[in-house]
Image: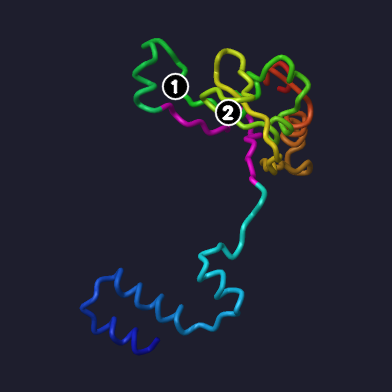
Amino acid sequence: MRDILQEIRNGNDRLQQSLRKISNTFYNNSELSIQEAVYNILQLPLSRSSEECIFIPTFPPTDRVHLVKSQTELQMLEKSSTDIYEHGLIEHYINRPEFLENVTLADFAANYRYATKPGPNSISLLNKSGYIFHRKQPRVIRFRNYHFEIGPENFLREHVMLCIPWRNEKADIL
């Protein structure tokens, strides 16, 4: 490793070549277990997660971040339209079909995925805002997780939002 570093300091090599030399030297002179060697030869990942996670934005409506629609979508809107933001999980939940009326936001996020195009077993959202599919394996949900001692209002609003079915956030929760 010292020889490689000295060669780099003298160097005519570019930064990328220098980093490649350091990494190759480190990799070739490290001891591996037989299992790691087999995984490297077969190009298998050394670790893998079987659970997919989804983040539920349980922030107050004024604190939520929204993505702006693409330039082509914005150009297709009417000039007086104020619908410039992409719809997220909360909007998909609000537009869920009537037969999912008693599904909570936590269950919806864990068990359904959104798509813009229909497919086999797709469920159409209200207002023609897309489609959802029931997942075979539920996702792990993550959320802001307010603490009762710090902000009891946000803590209670978040738990009502996650655990009780609702349609209109202003009327039903706030």
* Amino acid type indicated by mark 1: Ile
Q: Mark 2 points at which residue?
A: 62
Q: Name the residue under label 1.
A: 84
* Quadrant placement of the C terminus: top right
Residue 166 locus on image (x, y percent): 73, 21
Q: What element carries label 1?
A: loop
Residue 171 image-quadrant placement: top right
Distance from the alpha carbon under mark 2 to that under mark 1 = 16 Å
* Amino acid type indicated by mark 2: Thr
- Residue at point 57%, 32% (across, down): 64
- Residue at point 44%, 21% (across, down): 84
Query: Are the two marked residues, 2 and 1, in contact with CB atoms closer than 8 angstroms?
Result: no
- Residue at point 52%, 67% (across, down): 42
Magenta stretch, main secondary structure, is loop
Relative to 120, 116 lies left or right: left
Residue 64 magenta-highlighted: yes
**Stretch in magenta:** 52-69
The numbered disc on residue 154 is none
Q: Tag count in the figure?
A: 2
